[in-house]
Amino acid sequence: MVIVGGTFEMEPGRRQQFLESRVEMTRVSRGEAGCLEYTFAPDPIEPGRVVLFERWNSQEALDAHLVALRAGPMPDDSGIGPITSSVTIYDVSGERKLGR
């Protein structure tokens, strides 16, 4: 499994528009082979921050997603893109349920 985690910093008044510009990308990505989770979410405390969380069943599935993403039309930011962003890929060696 591969996890992609990231953050996007933007003008607080543009965050909702940024999120709305990612809805179709999210819908398409969730339908791709190997996608287990794909979400852009507003940070509940920082008004200009968006969090990205993705889970893929393999690096190959993520690679195919990235190729498709680069080949297709990018979201129309219309000047609402992030000021800064940071995205990291994590290779997962195992998993377990959280419980008592």
Image (cartoon, rainbow, N blue to C red):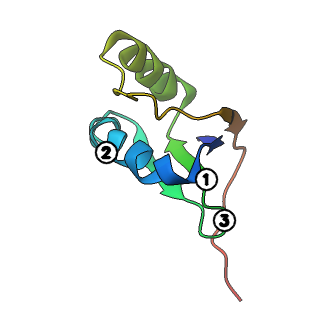
Sooner in the amino-acid sequence: mark 2 or mark 1: 2
Q: Secondary structure at mark 1?
A: loop
The alpha-carbon separation of the residues under discs 3 and 2 comes to 30 Å
Judged left or right of residue 58, residue 6 is right
| Location of residue 39 in the rendering, given as x and y in whole percent from the top left corner | 45, 50
Task: State which tag comes first along the sequence, 3 or 1.
Answer: 1
Disc 1 marks which amino acid?
A: Gly
Give the labeled residue for mark 3. 96
Residue drawn where x is 59% and y is 69% of the image: 44
Question: What residue is rendered at 67% in x and 83% in y?
Answer: 99
For the residues carrying marks 3 and 2, which lies nearer the camera in this image? 2
Compute the Cα span from label 3 to label 1: 33 Å
Q: Residue at x 68, y 33 (%)?
A: 84
Q: Is residue 35 left or right of residue 41?
A: left
Query: Tag 2, which secondary structure?
Result: helix
Q: Residue at x 56, y 27 (%)?
A: 59
Q: Residues within 10 Å of mark 1 (few under 14, many from 20)?
A: some
* Kind of residue at disc 3: Arg
Of the residues tagged 2 and 1, which is closer to the observer?
1
Q: Pointer 1: what residue? A: 48
Whether pointer 3 and pointer 2 mark residues with C-beta atoms closer than 8 Å, the reply is no
Q: Nearer the viewer, residue 31 or 77?
A: 77
The percent position of residue 100, horizontal first and vertical second, equals: 71, 89
Query: Badge 3: how crowded within 10 Å, few (<14), some, or many (20+)?
Result: few
Q: How crowded is the residue under tag 2: few (<14 C-alpha within 10 Å), some, or many (20+)?
A: some
Residue 97, horizontal then vertical, whole percent: 63, 71
Amino acid type, residue under disc 2 in the picture: Val
Query: In the rendered view, does 1 fall on the left or right side of 76?
Result: right
Q: Which residue is mark 2?
A: 23
